[in-house]
Amino acid sequence: MGGRWKGVNRLSSLRSARIRMTLSQRDLAREAGVTQKTIVDLELGRIEPRLQTMRKIAAALGIEPLEIDEFRKAIEVKVAA
């Protein structure tokens, strides 16, 4: 990961960010305009998020996409490609 994202606060996972905001998967999905299945699959690592989806979910949580580990990893992969 290196120093590229140094100084960016991060949470341990999408799930922890959602729980910290006291949102159910269903509520977060509704707020973000995505399906509950998308939230479930992201939390379980079954799918890699699209940039637009990361932005929607992060906005619904009131944080930046880079503050969510799964999103940070996906962004690093996209940047490296």
Image: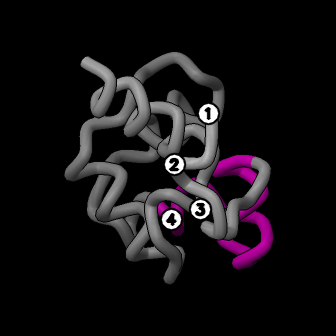
In this rendering, which labeled residue sits more in front, label 3 or label 1? 1
Q: CA distance from mark 3 to mark 1?
A: 14 Å
| Disc 3: which residue | 67
Disc 1 secondary structure class:
loop
Q: Position of residue 40 (x, y in %)?
A: 56, 36
In this rendering, which labeled residue sits more in front, label 3 or label 2? 2
Q: Position of residue 42 (x, y in %)?
A: 52, 34
| Of the pair 5 and 75, the residue shown nearer to us | 5
Majority secondary structure in the magenta region: helix
Give the label on residue 4, or none: 2
Q: Residue at point 50% right, 57% down?
A: 66
Q: Residues within 10 Å of mark 3 (few under 14, many from 20)?
A: some
Amino acid type, label 1: Met
Q: Earlier in the sequence, mark 3 or mark 1?
A: 1
**Is 27 contained in the magenta span?**
yes
| Range of magenta residues | 13-28
**Disc 3, disc 1: CB below 8 Å?**
no
